Image: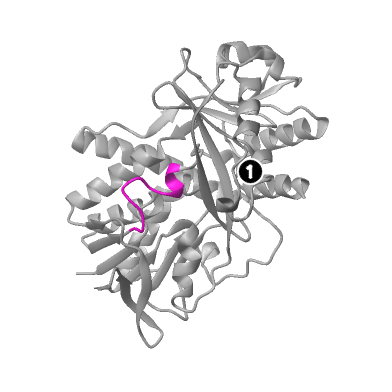
Amino acid sequence: MTRALVIGAGVIGAATAHRLAEAGADVTVLDAGGRTPGTSSATFSIDVTHLKTPHSYYLLNQRSAALHRELEREIRARTGAPGWRHPAPLVQWGHTEEEQRTLRARAERLADWGHPCRTADPGELRTLAPAVAPASCRATELVVHDDATWYDAPHLAHTLLDRAAALGADIRYDTPVTALLRDGERVRGAEARGRHFEADHVVNCAGPDAGRIAGLAGVRLPLRRIPGLVGESVPLAEPLRAIVATPGVDLRPAPGNRVCAISWPVDALLAPTPETRVPPEADLLGRCAAVLPAFRALGGTRIGVRPVPEDGLPLVGPHPHAPGLYTIATHSGVTLAPLLAALAAEELTTATPDPALAPYRPDRDTSRPIRDESLAVMSGHRAEAG
């Protein structure tokens, strides 16, 4: 029986543990935190397939979004557990001519790729998201994705970890990995809280900590840590019925009639090490209230640190100079988790490389210009902030 040690119990680690346990592996999961996942609990977590480029990467995200649907149906049929997918239209607009041109060009590209999206008159905002202030939209047209979805990421992680545990996986929280066990170059396990956990494969799903874990094996991961502030409203009398993406703030429904919010302009001003300064909640709240007047108070905020590969594309696979170590690290991990986990588990249990993962190996050259549009959006705001 294959012994697999998964480091990290966020969405990527949970999905990987689930697939490995399904495949019959002896799985142990080690996580430095508690049951509430770290970055996975501080994420906007919508299906971001529409933002993904090049086309091959768009298709990878599209496959994973479809797998979300299949996996949710399968688990619901087996256990009766509630789902984590929440379909809702995505409504986007820009204010400047450049912003509107960018949205229109993206919509045209997506139409060429067969992705369902459309332009609409701004008056349709009253139907799609009646709680939004009409005056907050100064655009001449909207871009609408009627088949969009947001994900309840903590619930997804808990559901998959529970399934993995039911299949025999050993899930250990508050167990930070401090060293990797090595026999020459080969990685044979990990040390945590003074105990040795031996394995045939150590799967690095540590999110923003993935670079440190790889470094324990002498491997450099081309991975940046980019902080992001996520705010959540108090419960609102009128629910938000759509995902709303504006130039200053993005909003989506959240459990309990709340609204979740992020702002790329606000995130661009966060310190590289977020612990060193107070996050600008007031700025985020002002942007939220300008679009959604009912969003008058923050029920809470969280800082998440995004693991962002240097070229924006996932890092998935073994390390030639550290056999036994396998990394899965990516931005947009909630969207990609089902597919990357399934492909990785298949590779680990069959020793057969999957061609779909060939462009995403951790030892590739990541020094080329930015290829993923979602990373370009994030980087553009950070550059403007100077």
Q: Position of residue 80 (x, y in %)?
A: 21, 32
Mark 1: give few (<14), some (14-19) or many (20+) Cα within 10 Å: many
Foreground of the two, 196 or 351: 196
Q: Which amino acid type is marked by label 1?
A: Asp
Please tell me which residue is depicted at 38% across the width and 51% down the height of the picture.
10
In this view, 13 is above or below 385: below
Q: Position of residue 35 (x, y in %)?
A: 31, 47
Q: Quadrant of residue 368?
A: bottom right
Q: Residue furthest bottom?
A: 184
Q: Which residues are magenta?
A: 31-41
Q: Position of residue 326 (x, y in %)?
A: 41, 68
Q: Quadrant of the N terminus?
A: bottom left
> Is 312 placed left or right of 39 in the picture?
right
Please tell me which residue is depicted at 32% across the width and 33% down the height of the picture.
83
In this view, 107 is above or below 169: above
> Is 292 placed left or right of 199 in the picture?
right
Which residue is identified by label 1?
A: 267
User: Can residue 198 be seen from the camera position used here?
Assistant: no
Q: Residue furthest right?
A: 97
Magenta region includes residue 319: no
Q: Quadrant of residue 317?
A: bottom left
Foreground of the two, 31 or 61: 31
Please tell me which residue is depicted at 29% across the width and 55% down the height of the picture.
173
Predominant secondary structure in magenta? Answer: loop
